[in-house]
Amino acid sequence: MTELIIAMDFSSKEEVYSFLEKFKHEQLFLKIGMELYYKEGPKIVEVIKAQGHKIFLDLKLHDIPNTVERTMKNLKSLGVDMVNVHAAGGLEMMKAARQGFGEGIMIAVTQLTSTSEKSMQAEQLINESLQTSVLNYAKLTQEAGLDGVVCSALEASLIHNHVDKQFLCVTPGIRPKTSSVGDQKRVVSPMEACELGSDYIVIGRPITQSHNPYESYKAILKEMENAHE
Ligand code: C5P
């Protein structure tokens, strides 16, 4: 069953609290990214946790193994439910991340979606297709004992077929048919993402910028339920 994660791409705690006011009786899964975390610090995590929501802390760690392990220990103590690293940090770094975080959902970013095949080849000197590199990083992520990767819903079946059916595909780039696409280029609907095998879909603006966030959230959940029927 696919789960929904709402991307809290707000720049201050006031905006977050006013958004969450509309969801008083719901238990949400919320993604906190660098923008909000670096502005408000760990306190924002504590406050949201205290309201009973789950948290994906999207800080994309990438450093030497020792530093990543110790940082992951700190993130674990905040009580977050999901964290991530850059697979480009390597096998040892990812194993250290797992060691530091212990149990809990840990995923990796493979190639950023802002990286084109051309720039990957020219700048990272990887003489392969983008898809080969993404699959290579996904396999490395699994070998390190992590749970999955961030990818497009369009890549989920490829990853499930070449890595493991249980390996998690966490997929942004989702747009309900009624929303504007914004800066996302290749988008799929919540229903399509479920059908394509996404384990978690990450949705921001179609909910956070909606004139009625609660209604938009409910409509997306309904669409997801229908896909699983
Ligand atoms: O507003 P929107 O639904 O586009 O938000 C998607 C979220 O997922 C944002 O927080 C964005 O940074 C994140 N994301 C993405 N594409 C990726 C990785 C992360 O859109 N490849």
Image (cartoon, rainbow, N blue to C red):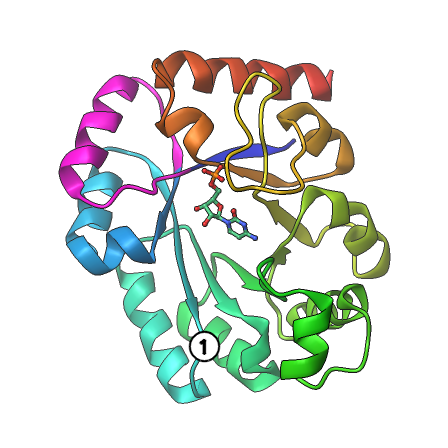
Question: Looking at the image, can residue 41 be seen?
Answer: no
Residue 97: in magenta span? no
Q: Amino acid at mark 1?
A: His
Q: Where does the image place residue 84, in percent across and percent down from the top left?
A: 48, 62
Q: Which residue is mark 1?
A: 62
**Which residue appears farthest toward the right when viewing the image?**
161
Residue 9: in magenta span? yes
Looking at the image, is 96 positioned above or below residue 227? below
Looking at the image, is 25 positioned above or below residue 184? above
- All told, the count of numbered labels is 1
The residue sitting at 35% across, 13% down in the picture is 212
Residue 52: image quadrant is top left
Q: Specify start and end residues of the magenta stretch as a single range.
A: 7-29
Looking at the image, is 82 positioned above or below residue 52? below
Q: Where does the image place residue 183, in percent across and percent down from the top left?
A: 52, 41
Q: Where does the image place residue 184, in percent across and percent down from the top left?
A: 56, 41
The residue sitting at 67% across, 33% down in the picture is 188
Question: Looking at the image, can residue 195 be seen?
Answer: yes
